[in-house]
Image: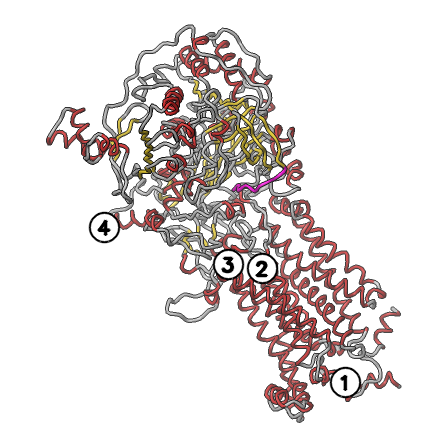
């Protein structure tokens, strides 16, 4: 109780902040002559990993998906695991921006911009995989409905077609939402930029924003509408992704539990990723006054809550297998726990179910290094979850004669790590060239900050 | 029938197709009536397709088979004395002899070609005693015109070559440099011959050491004639002009004699002389013989033969070996090495072991455990003064203290397929001990290698996939298959696919393994209600044809012919060992093999599996581009052009019969391969899913033909490739809308069941459950006889 009331009174941003100081802190990151060493190091690491992606993709297009460890029965491997993982990570941004906006949670303002950026880049990484994954990528556009001379349409009963709609809608709305929210800040950047090129570019993208009252009015309406549009997407996208599995007949996939369990998992991994990114950014750019302990702690709490839902999902899977009385379901569960991939399952339980229990403790929630490690563990855990779902269900299904093992190859790893590289490159470019915190929104909180000063 | 180390139900030996056909016909049972069913006893060292069909199977070292035959002969009153035998084998003799005696005139003992003459003599004596001659066994003049001891001939030739007496040596379609036994130094002698000519289809080891290598025509390119095992003459009619400038043996011999006529002319003249016909009369007989595929009434007449009373001492009787015994057998794919360069055969999983692309040193689990061998370990085998390195494979069902190897590998000069595949077991063979070598020398090398096996899991996990009943249960419950059936149990071999496998089957397999069919108890699974199919989609209505298939598990002997036929019919690519090891084999029909009972003494079960052409096909609704769709005749069609390769259909297929072109598996450039392809079947490229189509191209040919003739397709007009090749007639295909079609009638049989019917996929292919003709007086084996005794 004491903690809660204390938090309520705790200011969202640090003391001694003025309108000017907020703008300076954030805008100077982009407009400063040089970037910190940390930035160069991060970008270089990202580029190196992304090189693996480029190399892997070229090799893949030249040879085919046989360069991966796939086989029959395991027709889906890293590509689908990574796709679901990235899409899941992409959920936090919209949740923070849209739902917290609707619930008027003002602490969102310090983190929403880069959470949304993270969403976009995660969706960009996710979007790669379905394309890389198909056997004939040059024909992947056949999944889109378009009028054609063959008079053939996609097969609308297939969850993969639903995926195309869900993910493309999500990407579009997230991009619009993010960009709309950026416009006032881009105008600020335009006004402050000294460099001619920067001035011109910021000028173009700020769409002639002058800060007039009518601009603000329209902006607020547009932003609220987009927030309203995004909200159902938070739930729908991962529900549809879960249908890729739940609609099938394969034990371990065929479960009504999947939609809520996937959505919770997505938010869980998304928040973990926001923490993973926010903690170093806050440290290196010295943003302690803008991203305060209150933000960090709130994110830790959401992580714990969604982690518990995910844990409940794991328990229910076991219960369903037992209660179904279906020998295939029961075998699947037994195989998941004690089969050749059993270690993956127990690592997953450790990462996703046991580790976040530490977040019950306020001390842990406010201990930055520990929290950072926990967030990494959760990210790994959520990847393992997808591995367990995709691989252990497929590798031993109905007929023991078709059972086989799946071992990832060098190219599986190169492309997976490469997608992380692509994400990092985009994220570091974002840090350098786009205001990472919504300046004008944080300014709403400056009066609070001034109160603390007094 | 008693098969003594005889693999007569494989497609290897002479007359095997006829034997399989006759055997399978003797297994046909209908609606609870199993009275006319034959019974097969198998005593063998190897684990063969024949053994998988046994009603009772005894694992015995190859060298102990003679002792078994002696004991059986004694029990039947033709031998002198019983022999020292292992306990298990001893328990067999009395009830087996009683059963054979009770079937006087209908029982027969069959001996494998690789058993020594003494065992054959014993079998003849037993068969004579059982009145088999004139009944199931027939004696004729030998098919070979002048049988001789070929090894003695070869040794004599080698001696002459050594002495320089041979000036010119012409070798016709033979590769003695590779396959002469180790104690015949053919290679050294060959080099002493001043002029050496080799006629062969490939440039091989022998050709390499000859001055001239002459190209041999394929048997499909040339005229000739052949005698079948019963003596029937067949005129060999070519299907194609020689692709390359080659000669047949007949033509080469003719050339050497100064006769430049073609094989065709030579053959016609020989038959004209033999028939003493000319002009139109000859032409009519010639055409009839070619049309019929054989020359009528040329089978040898049975001859009167009696077994000499002193048969037991007429030939030398080999002793049973002590310790580890090497058993050498021809390979089901490479045979003696001549098919070593054939990709289809290399990739065809060997019966029972389901291995591809290698020969192995196979051991029973108990023997392997004793010697701490694991799958893939490299060992050195020492015999006949030679040592070869071989990979280990642990195969349940082999006799203990036996190492089984197959011939035909380790070729040094062969084509791009066979080079570097396997090890040469001929080096372990000597003329004194051709097929069984006592006291095998074995040493571990401490290295391992990967082998490409298409089926890693051995056990049915207690699932009722192959439903089996004993003949007695079958007569009492003809509907046993539809009432839930009896799933086999079985075990994994440790190290097969993961460290936890053994544990899992200890809990599952053993519990289910002993369980037998219990009337009225389905294993916790709903049996699909065919009258009220559960689907949100409207039921399809098939006005015209509705294609369906039945596979009779009681007839299938597990010979692999269906797989080979499908490869050829449907342009299925050969993908190589590495890809097979990754689990990407492309066969549209596969032959699943399960072990039932204990790992040490299992029964073996075969189940051919094709695309089931489900009515509610799980693959169809998940394809995002509609590349797999239902036809109006109920086929589950693949539209290759439309497939983008998401592989969702394969994931959602409970039978996992779909195959994916993970890489560019087809060879589009090699000219000869272009000619090998079926022009009616699309050649699939990279990134596309494929699967069994029920040979839709054959359906379409028949449809076009019938429409032009203004009639319906008649039953039996369409045969799928697998059905056509099946010597056991286990596969029946036809129109299930026609109540009178064979397939409809079989689907009405009480043994008919659908695989995984509880998933409501409503497969068009259904199975006829297997029935075992167990002799209740026999000692317990894992074929279900022990459970029977409990019941």
Residue B708 got which mark?
A: 4
Task: Please name the residue shown 26% across and 38% down the image.
Answer: B238
Name the residue that disc number 3 marks.
B646
Q: Nearer the viewer, residue B668 or B295?
A: B668
Residue B156, image x, y percentages: 38, 20
Q: Which residues are magenta?
A: B446-454
Name the residue that disc number 2 marks.
A80
Q: Is the C-beta separation of discs 3 and 1 under 8 Å?
A: no
Look at the picture and state if A295 lies above or below B299: below
Q: CA distance from mark 4 to mark 2?
A: 50 Å
Label 1: few (<14), some (14–19) or many (≥20) C-alpha neighbours in 10 Å: some
Q: Earlier in the sequence, mark 1 or mark 2?
A: 1
User: Mark 4 — on which chain does it sit?
Assistant: B
Q: Nearer the viewer, residue B466 or A436?
A: A436
Q: CA distance from mark 3 to mark 4?
A: 40 Å
Left or right of A251, for residue B429: left
Look at the picture and state if B87 lies above or below A434: above
Queried whether the magenta region covers residue B41, the answer comes back as no
User: Mark 2 — on which chain does it sit?
Assistant: A
Q: Of helix, strand and loop, which one carries label 1?
A: helix
Residue A22 got which mark?
A: 1
Q: Of helix, strand and loop, which one carries label 3?
A: loop
Q: CA distance from mark 4 to mark 1?
A: 86 Å
Label 4: few (<14), some (14–19) or many (≥20) C-alpha neighbours in 10 Å: few
Q: Residue furthest left?
A: B279
Residue B373, image x, y percentages: 62, 33
Label 3: few (<14), some (14–19) or many (≥20) C-alpha neighbours in 10 Å: many
Q: Is the C-beta separation of discs 3 and 4 under 8 Å?
A: no
User: Mark 3 — on which chain does it sit?
Assistant: B
Quadrant of the snapshot with the C terminus of chain B: top right
Evaluate whether residue B259 shows in this view: yes
Label 2: few (<14), some (14–19) or many (≥20) C-alpha neighbours in 10 Å: some
């Amino acid at each position: 109780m004491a903690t809660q009331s204390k938090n309520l009174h705790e200011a969202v941003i640090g003391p001694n902040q003025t309108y000017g100081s907020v703008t300076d802190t954030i805008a100077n990151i982009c407009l400063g002559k040089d970037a910190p060493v940390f930035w160069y190091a991060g970008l270089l690491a990202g580029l190196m990993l992304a090189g693996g992606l480029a190399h892997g993709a070229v090799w893949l297009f030249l040879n085919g998906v046989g360069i991966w460890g796939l086989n029959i029965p395991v027709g889906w491997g890293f590509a689908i695991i990574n796709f679901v993982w990235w899409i899941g990570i992409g959920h936090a941004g919209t949740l923070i921006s849209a739902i917290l906006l609707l619930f008027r949670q003002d602490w969102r303002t310090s983190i929403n911009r880069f959470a949304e950026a993270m969403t976009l880049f995660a969706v960009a990484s996710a979007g790669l995989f379905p394309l890389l994954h198909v056997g004939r990528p040059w024909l992947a556009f056949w999944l889109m409905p378009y009028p054609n001379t063959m008079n053939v349409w996609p097969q609308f009963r297939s969850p993969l077609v639903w995926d195309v709609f869900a993910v493309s809608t999500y990407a579009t709305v997230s991009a619009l939402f993010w960009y709309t929210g950026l416009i006032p800040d881009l105008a600020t950047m335009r006004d402050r930029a000294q460099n001619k090129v920067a001035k011109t570019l910021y000028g173009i993208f700020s769409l002639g924003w002058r800060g007039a009252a009518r601009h603000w009015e329209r902006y607020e309406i547009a932003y609220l509408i987009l927030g309203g549009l995004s909200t159902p997407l938070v739930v729908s996208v991962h529900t549809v992704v879960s249908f890729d599995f739940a609609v099938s007949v394969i034990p371990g996939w065929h479960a009504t539990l999947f939609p809520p369990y996937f959505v919770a998992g997505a938010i869980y991994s998304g928040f973990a990723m926001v923490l993973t990114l926010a903690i170093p950014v806050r440290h290196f750019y010295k943003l302690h006054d803008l991203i305060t302990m209150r933000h960090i702690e709130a994110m830790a709490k959401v992580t714990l809550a969604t982690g518990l839902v995910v844990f409940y999902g794991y328990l229910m899977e076991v219960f369903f297998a037992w209660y179904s009385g279906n020998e295939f379901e029961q075998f699947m569960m037994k195989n998941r726990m004690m089969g050749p991939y059993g270690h993956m399952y127990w690592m997953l339980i450790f990462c996703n179910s046991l580790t976040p229990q530490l977040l019950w403790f306020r001390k842990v929630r406010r201990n930055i290094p520990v929290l950072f490690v926990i967030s990494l563990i959760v990210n790994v855990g959520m990847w393992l979850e997808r591995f367990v779902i995709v691989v252990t269900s497929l590798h031993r299904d109905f007929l023991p004669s078709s059972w086989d093992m799946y071992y990832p190859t060098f190219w599986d790893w190169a492309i997976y790590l490469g997608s992380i590289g692509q994400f990092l490159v985009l994220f570091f470019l974002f840090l350098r060239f786009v205001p990472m915190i919504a300046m004008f929104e944080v300014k709403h909180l400056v009066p609070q900050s001034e109160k603390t000063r007094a | 029938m008693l098969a003594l180390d005889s693999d007569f139900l494989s497609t290897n030996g002479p007359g095997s197709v006829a034997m399989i056909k006759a055997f399978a016909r003797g297994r046909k049972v209908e609606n609870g009536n199993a009275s006319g069913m034959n019974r097969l006893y198998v005593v063998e060292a190897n684990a063969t397709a024949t053994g998988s069909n046994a009603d009772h199977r005894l694992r015995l070292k190859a060298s102990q088979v003679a002792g078994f035959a002696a004991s059986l002969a004694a029990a039947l009153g033709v031998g002198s004395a019983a022999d020292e035998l292992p306990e298990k084998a001893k328990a067999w003799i009395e009830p087996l002899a009683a059963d054979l005696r009770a079937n006087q005139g209908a029982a027969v003992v069959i001996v494998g070609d690789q058993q020594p003459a003494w065992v054959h003599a014993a079998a003849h004596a037993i068969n004579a005693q059982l009145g088999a001659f004139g009944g199931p066994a027939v004696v004729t003049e030998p098919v070979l015109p002048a049988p001789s001891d070929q090894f003695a001939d070869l040794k004599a030739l080698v001696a002459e070559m050594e002495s320089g007496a041979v000036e010119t040596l012409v070798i016709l379609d033979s590769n003695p440099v590779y396959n002469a036994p180790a104690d015949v130094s053919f290679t050294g002698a060959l080099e002493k011959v001043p002029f050496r000519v080799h006629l062969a289809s490939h440039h091989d080891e022998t050709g390499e050491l000859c001055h001239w290598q002459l190209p041999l025509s394929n048997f499909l390119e040339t005229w000739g004639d052949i005698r079948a095992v019963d003596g029937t003459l067949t005129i060999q009619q070519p299907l194609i002009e020689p692709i390359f400038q080659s000669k047949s043996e007949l033509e080469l011999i003719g050339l050497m004699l100064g006769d430049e006529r073609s094989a065709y002319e030579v053959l016609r003249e020989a038959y004209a002389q033999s028939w003493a016909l000319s002009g139109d009369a000859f032409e009519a007989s010639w055409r009839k013989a070619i049309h019929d595929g054989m020359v009528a009434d040329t089978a040898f007449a049975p001859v009167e033969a009696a077994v000499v009373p002193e048969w037991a001492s007429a030939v030398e009787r080999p002793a049973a070996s002590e310790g580890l015994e090497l058993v050498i057998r021809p390979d089901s794919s490479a045979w003696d090495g001549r098919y070593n360069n054939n990709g289809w055969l290399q990739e065809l999983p060997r019966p029972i072991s389901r291995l591809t692309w290698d020969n192995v040193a196979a051991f029973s689990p108990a023997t392997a455990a004793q010697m701490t061998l694991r799958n893939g370990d490299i060992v050195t085998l020492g015999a006949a003064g030679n040592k070869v390195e071989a990979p280990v494979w642990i195969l349940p069902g082999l006799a203990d203290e036996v190492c089984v190897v197959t011939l035909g590998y380790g070729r040094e000069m062969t084509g791009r397929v066979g080079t570097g595949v396997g090890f040469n077991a001929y080096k372990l063979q000597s003329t004194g001990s051709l097929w069984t070598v006592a006291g095998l020398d074995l040493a571990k090398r401490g290295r391992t290698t990967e082998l490409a096996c298409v089926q890693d899991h051995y056990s049915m996990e207690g699932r009722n996939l192959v439903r089996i009943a004993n003949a007695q249960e079958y007569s009492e419950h003809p509907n046993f298959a539809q009432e839930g059936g009896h799933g086999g149990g079985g075990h994994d071999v440790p190290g097969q696919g993961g460290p936890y496998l053994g544990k899992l089957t200890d809990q599952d397999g053993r519990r289910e393994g002993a369980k037998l069919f219990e009337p009225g108890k389905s294993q916790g699974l709903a049996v699909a209600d065919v009258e009220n199919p559960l689907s949100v989609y409207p039921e399809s209505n098939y006005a015209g044809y509705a294609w369906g298939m039945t596979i009779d598990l009681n007839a299938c002997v597990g010979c692999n012919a269906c797989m080979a036929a499908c490869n050829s019919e449907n342009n299925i690519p050969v993908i190589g060992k590495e890809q097979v090891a990754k689990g990407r084999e492309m066969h549209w029909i596969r032959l699943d093999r399960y072990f039932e009972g204990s790992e040490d003494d299992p029964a073996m079960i075969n189940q051919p599996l094709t695309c089931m052409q489900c009515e509610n096909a799980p693959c169809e609704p998940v394809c995002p581009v509609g590349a797999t769709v239902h036809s109006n005749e109920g086929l589950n069609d693949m539209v290759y052009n439309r497939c983008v390769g998401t592989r969702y259909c394969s994931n959602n297929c409970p039978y996992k019969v779909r195959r994916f072109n993970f890489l560019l598996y087809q060879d589009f450039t090699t000219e000869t391969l272009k000619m090998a392809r079926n022009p009616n079947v699309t050649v699939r490229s990279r990134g596309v899913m494929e699967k069994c189509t029920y040979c839709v191209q054959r359906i379409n040919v028949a449809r076009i033909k019938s429409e032009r003739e203004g009639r319906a397709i008649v039953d039996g007009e369409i045969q799928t490739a697998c059905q056509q090749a099946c010597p056991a007639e286990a596969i029946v295909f036809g129109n299930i809308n026609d109540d009178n079609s064979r397939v409809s009638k079989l689907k009405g049989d009480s043994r008919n069941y659908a695989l995984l019917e509880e998933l409501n996929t409503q497969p068009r292919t259904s199975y006829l459950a297997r029935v075992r003709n167990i002799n209740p007086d026999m000692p317990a084996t894992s074929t279900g006889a022990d459970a029977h005794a409990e019941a």
